[in-house]
Image: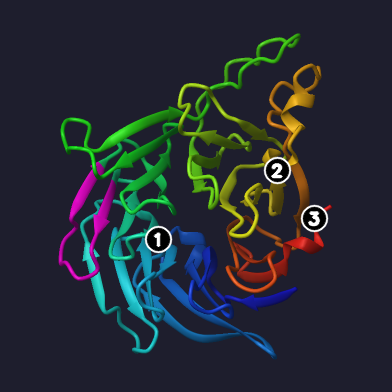
Amino acid sequence: MLEFRTQGFNGYSVKYSPFFDSRIAVASAANFGLVGNGRLYVLGLTANGVVAEKWFDTQDSLFDTTWSEAHENQLLTAGGDGSVKLFDITLDQFPVQSWQEHAREVFAVHWNLVGKDTFLSSSWDGTVKIWNPNAPASIATLPTHTCTYSAAFSPHSPSILSCVGSDSHLRIFDLRTPASASNHLTLNIPIHTPPKPRMGAAAPPGIAPTEALTHDWNKYRDTVVATAGVDRLVRTFDIRAPQAGPIAVLPGHEYAVRRVSWSPHLSDILLSASYDMTCRVWTDGSAMGAGSMKQDNMLEDPMVLGGGREMGRMGRHTEFATGVDWCLFGAEGWCASTGWDERVLVWDARALMQ
């Protein structure tokens, strides 16, 4: 396990470069993001450990970062002052572009993985905005009417995007639809829908809505999305059946789940980071074939669904674990995590899986 210390700054997000297997970006904030500056680190994995190749200081906290899909040296930040900034690591100090439209903190930025020519940002102001890096203003604003913590483009389509927020709903937008009264909104899935009762089992109790903090699209199954948040459960949904409730429910975390990320190599594996200071590796049960059949008559916890389970955990963080990401290259299983303990850890998830 490799470690880097973000001295004086608490980590909020970590992202591997889509171009280099040895480059990692970390968005961080002083004073746990409550007040003060932010810092964007660009870290290199070398024979001598993790080194800071570059860093940029910002006026306000940074809550998220994402690498450009079109330019290997550029990356975006989400700022506490409502700004979205584009940095180039070959240049010093200042961003090459800055956009200031959001009225509240920006909590997520994500580059279009298919089109590669646009990116999005989501904010506590209840909007998701679509941007072109060459345009001075946003090219679309999608109202969510709720504090939006996480937004992402589908890895399978240049025009489908999703978000989750404080009202416990997963929203799917399709930019190909007419921008009528629905503002491109095509699905609005209540995350707190209880799973369908099994034969012989009592119906699960109704679940109160809680804030959804994170979500991610499966990289292989183009209709599957994982969500997680304050109620400590990781859930997966199939957007082809929006009213059916979750297809898998994975309990285990002891506090809110702050980040989930599907594996780029395996269709059933995902990683989560939580306020309980652990990062956990899960299978959603989809690759086991008979997993769901076996469960039909098992009179166990009605909140466990889909045959998934925790496969391992990494408990080396000593504060909230806030960010986690998989390496796209090399041996499958390498990942990085960051947290409020001012540390970035690089580790092999396969060493934990059993």
Q: Residue at x 58, y 80 (%)?
A: 22
Q: Considering depth in this image, is 135 or 81 the residue closer to the camera?
A: 135
Callout 3: few (<14), some (14-19), or many (20+) C-alpha neighbours within 10 Å? some
Residue 129 appears left or right of 77: left
Residue 252 appears left or right of 182: right
Task: State the extent of the magenta-drawn residues as a range.
Answer: 128-142
Is 129 included in the stretch rendered in magenta?
yes
Q: Residue at x 80, y 58 (%)?
A: 352
Residue that numbered label 3 is attached to:
353
Q: Closer to the observer: label 2 or label 3?
A: 2
Asked which secondary structure carries label 1, the reply is: loop
- Amino acid carrying label 3: it is Met
From mark 2 to mark 1, how far is it between C-alphas?
25 Å
If you read the primary sequence from the N terminus, does the residue marked by circle 1 or circle 3 appear first?
Answer: 1
Residue that numbered label 2 is attached to:
287
Image coords of residue 135 (percent x, y): 16, 67
Quick check: 138 above or below 250? below
From mark 2 to mark 3, how far is it between C-alphas?
15 Å
Q: Closer to the observer: label 1 or label 3?
A: 1
Quadrant of the image containing the N terminus? bottom right
Residue 71 appears left or right of 28: left
If you read the primary sequence from the N terminus, does the residue marked by circle 2 or circle 3 appear first?
Answer: 2
Quick check: 128 above or below 241? below
